Image: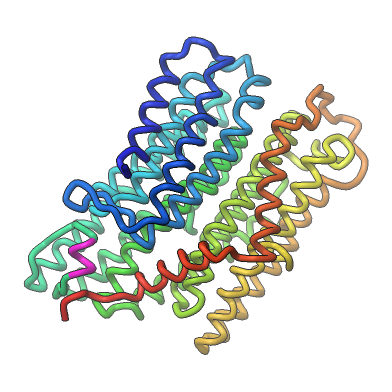
Amino acid sequence: MIVWLILAPLAAAAIAMAIPSNRFRPWILPAAASVQLALVARLVPHGDPRLFNRWLAVDPLSRPFLAIVGVVFFLCSLYAPSYLRIRAERPNRVLCACLLLFLAAMNLVALAHHLGLMWVAAETMTLVTIPSIYFNHNPRSLEAAWKTLVLGSVGIAMALLGSFFLAYAMLEGGSASTLLIDELVERPHTLSLPWLRAAFVLLVVGYGTKMGLAPMHTWKPDAYGEAPGMAGALLAGGMTSCAFLCVLRFVHIARIADDADYASRILLFFGLLSMATAAVYMAKQKDIKRCLAYSSVEHMGMLVFGLGIGGGAVAGALLHVIHNAVCKTGMFLAAGNIHRAYGSKSTDAVRGVLRRLPASGGLLLVGFFAITGSPLFGPFVSESMIVGGAFASGQLAAGLAFLALMLIVFLGMGNTLIHCALGPEPESANATRFRDRIPMVAPVAICMLLTFALGIHTPEFLRDWIDGAVAFLASGPAVP
C-alpha cells in the first residue's frame, strides 16, 4: 500500500487539472489530504514494508516525516478553499495541481531508499514549487521563483556530485558500489575516507540548500516572502523537513563508516552559522514573511546543530522537526491573513494588527513566543533537549553560543512582530474589507493548540517513533 502515498496525490493532481471550475477545484486539496492522513495512519505504525526491491520503504526514520508531511499538508488544505475564493482574480488550476504534486514528491523523499531516487524526488520538490511562488504574477514573485529555481538546481547538482563521490568512495575502498540505502547500512563497506568526506560536504551543502542552511539560504527570504501563505507554510514545514531527512540518511552512513566526528564538526559549523545569519538579518527586518523566513533559517540551523552534538540532542532535533513544522505552518497562515487585510507585509504599513485582526494577530503572537522557545510550548521542549545534549556532552561553548543566538533572534523577531501587533494603525494603512474568517483562522488555531499540547505532553507513540529513529541512526552494519 505504500505506493498509494505517491499515486493518490498524483491522481488528485490529474483530477485538479481536469476540473474546469476555479471555485470547486480547491476542494480537491482537503480531500487528498484526508486520504493522505488515512494512509499514513494505516501504514506508519505497522512494520517496515518495502517495495520494488527495497527502493521504497517505511523505516524508523521515515515514520515521523511521513506523519508531519501529512499533518502540515492537511492543515494547509483546510485553509486553501477560502483563500483561493477571495483570490478569485487568479486562476488556481496550476497552483492546486502543483501543491498535490508537491505532496507526492515529499512522500517520495520520505519513502525513497535509493540515493538516486531520493535525489530525483528532492529536485521534483523544487520544480513543482516554482508555480506556487509565482502565483501572484508580479516582478517580485518572478524574481523569487527564478532565484529558487537557480539556487535549488545548483544545490541539487552538488548533491548529485556528492552521491557520485560516495559511490566512488566504495570503489576506491575496494567495496562493491551501491546506492541502495538498505545495503549501505546493513552490509559492511570499506570506504575511502577522503572521498567519503568530500561526498559528505557536497551532500550537506546540496541538501542544505533545500533546507535553507546559511550561506545557501539566499533563496528562502524571497520565496517565502512572495509565495501565498499556504505555499510558504508547506515550504517551511514540508520541504525543509524532507531535506533534513536526506541529510539524516548521509549522517547515518558516515556514522557507520566510523567518521562521525568529521560529520559532527561540519554539522555544528553549518548549524551555528545559520543561527548567526538569522540573528543578524532579523535584527532590523521590516517584512513579516521575510522575518519568518529567517526564523526558518535559524531553526534549520538548530536541527543540524543537534544532529552534530549527538547523544540526547539527536532526539531533540528529531522532535524539533515536528514542533517547528506545526508552529511555523500556523505562523505563515496567520501572516497570510495579515497580508490580505493590509495589502502589505511591511511594518511601515502593518500596525495595530490586534485591532483589525484580533484572532490572526493574537495567534501570530502566540506563535512568536512558541517558536522562540518560550515554556509550555513544543519548541521549548525540543530546544531544551538540544541544549541539554550539548552541555551533557561537554560542549559548553557550543551550548552557550546556541543560547546566545536564540536570545538575539528573540529580540529581533519580537521587535518586528510586536511592533506590528500593537499600537495604532498608520494613517496611510490600506483599508481592505478582509477580516478574520473562521475557515482561515481555524487552521492557525489548530496549529497553535497542537504546539501547546506538544509542550505539555509528548504522546507515547511519538516518543516511540523518536526513540526508534535515534536507535536506527546509531545502528551499524548487521554483519560484522
Extreme-top residue of the structure? 20
Task: Give me the residue at 75% from left, 36% from top.
Answer: 338
| Image height of 191 relative to 300, above or below | below
Q: Position of residue 250 (x, y in %)?
A: 31, 64
Q: Picture coordinates of residue 335 (x, y %)?
A: 70, 40
**Relative to the observer, which residue lies in front, 24 or 418?**
24
- Residue 131: where, in percent of width, then height? 46, 28
Image point 20% across, 69% down: which residue?
186
Quadrant of the frame with the C terminus? bottom left
Residue 205 visible in this rendered orientation of the protein? no
Q: Is residue 309 left or right of residue 157?
A: right
Q: Quadrant of residue 197?
A: bottom left
Report the label total. 0
Magenta stretch contains residue 441: no
Magenta-highlighted residues = 182-186
Please report the residue visible at 32 percent of the width from the left and 59 percent of the height from the top: 203
Residue at 29% x, 72% y: name it: 254
- The residue nearer to you, when weighing 151 against 132, is 132
**Residue 287: percent from the left, percent from the top?**
69, 43
Predominant secondary structure, magenta span: helix
Vertical side of 3 occupied by 269: above or below: below
Q: Where 93 sits versus 335, above or below?
A: above
